[in-house]
Amino acid sequence: MERWLNELEPKLITWRRHFHKYPEVGWTEYVTTAKIVEELERLGFTLYIGKDAVDSSSRSGVPNVEQLEEAELRAKEHNVPKALIEKMSGGHTGVVARLDTGRKGPHTALRFDIDALPIFEAAEDHLPNAEGFQSLHDGLMHACGHDGHTSIGLGVAHYLYRHQDELSGEFTLLFQPAEEGSRGAKAMVEKGWLSNVDHFLSGHIGISDEEVGLVAATSEGFLATTKFDITFKGKASHAGAKPEEGKNALLSAANFSQHAYAIPRHSAGDTRVNIGTLEAGSGRNVTADYAFLRGESRGETEELDRYMYEQIKQIAQASADLYGTTVEIEEVGQGTTAECDYVWIDRLEDVAKKYNTINKVLPKLSIGASEDVTHMMRAVKEDGGEVTYMIFGTPLKEGHHHPQFDYDENVLRVGVLAVTGLLEGLHCKD
């Protein structure tokens, strides 16, 4: 296995750097999807794309028509085949790859997220810039490691292709769009891909500052979350001549933002709130007649997240009433909580004993954030399957969602080895 990994590693790095250069946010991953399809078509998987991969009505936070048209134009400029663009039309991105060995055995599903973030990537003191694979899309960046997750997924696909004669059972690889904002997993769950699954594997690069070679066999501390957009609508007026005629939406939004952060924290567990963007008004001498903001709540349980979100809705309405504006609130994403099965700890320790690539196994590590994968984990557990979410250690100079985020690319081989080593133990023919 490790000799094969040595041969694969240059490809892992090449794939990662390609995806890093062409970041795309949720439901616009046309170029990313096309590259995944290109690689998987060579390996004999049965591929499902577009509405065959995701349930259209279960998607959340789909970009507007103009943003989707821009993404499709970008795909044309990158020579994505017309037929593939048409299949993904309307933001139906992502890929599901199926492999059935034809031999009786378990069914394992694996999830790899593929989307990027709306962040301007740093130019100075940043390896992607120094090595020439920085983002080519201004304002978009792989700042959470999903470029590496996609690369690991392709590495796992190559393992399955090369070793399928030695394996039994079935495999479903989910290259999931729109993880950021907790918007995409439900669309794959509702399509039925997590039904009748015996084992489910996923994971994340980084999270905390660790050495390469460390792998956490399970994760805990997933926070439930609600993502929301709020629009305040007021009335424009001349700010100098007729200020009394205006209804200031900017003031409603500003009041809301301040008071949202003042929501009392709950004694039953951790809670969070964040207002990420605020756009308002049209000119310095015009009473702002609109304001738009994006935010999120989080909680240690679904009940705690709902407590936060209900408070947010009340504060939004009160802020509108205070300044005579109206308010519209839209939920655009939602994540839940989930628990890993501890049986994976012994399994991963067995892999580490066999292969030197993994030099330390932690039984568990807290993620301390939200993850769309929880919808998939819950679906598999409710159907009687075993699930885990691993964390692949790497030094982190800066944290996730930072313009200088980067990781040690040696972590890619560790991720592939951890996943394929577990698959080897579960699926090798008797």
Image: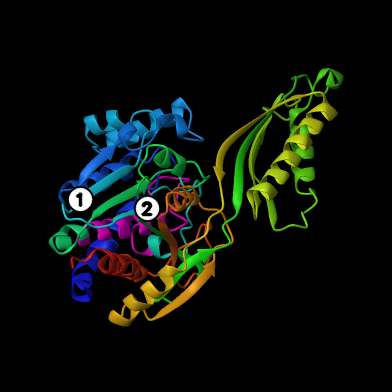
Is label 1 in a helix, a strand or a loop?
strand
Where 315 falls versus 42 (above or below)?
above
- The range drawn in magenta is 130-159
Q: Nearer the viewer, residue 159 or 199?
A: 199
Is residue 63 shown above or below 339? above
Percent x, y of residue 427? 24, 63
The residue to which callout 1 is attached is 100
Q: Residue at position x 49%, y 41% from top?
A: 183
Choose the circle earlier in sequence order: 2 or 1: 1
* Residue in the image at 48% along x and 74% along y: 363
The spot of residue 102 in percent (x, y) is 16, 52
Depth check: give the residue in front, 361 or 76.
Answer: 361
Amino acid, disc 2: Arg
Task: Indicate the amino acid at tag 1.
Answer: Asp
Quadrant of the frame with the N terminus: bottom left
Query: Mark 2, mark 1: which one is toward the viewer?
Result: 1
Residue 241 can be seen, yes or no: no
Residue in view at x 56 percent, y 53 percent: 337
Image colouring: rainbow
Report how far apart the C-alphas of labels 2 and 1 lie in the structure.
17 Å
Residue 15 vs residue 205: left or right? left
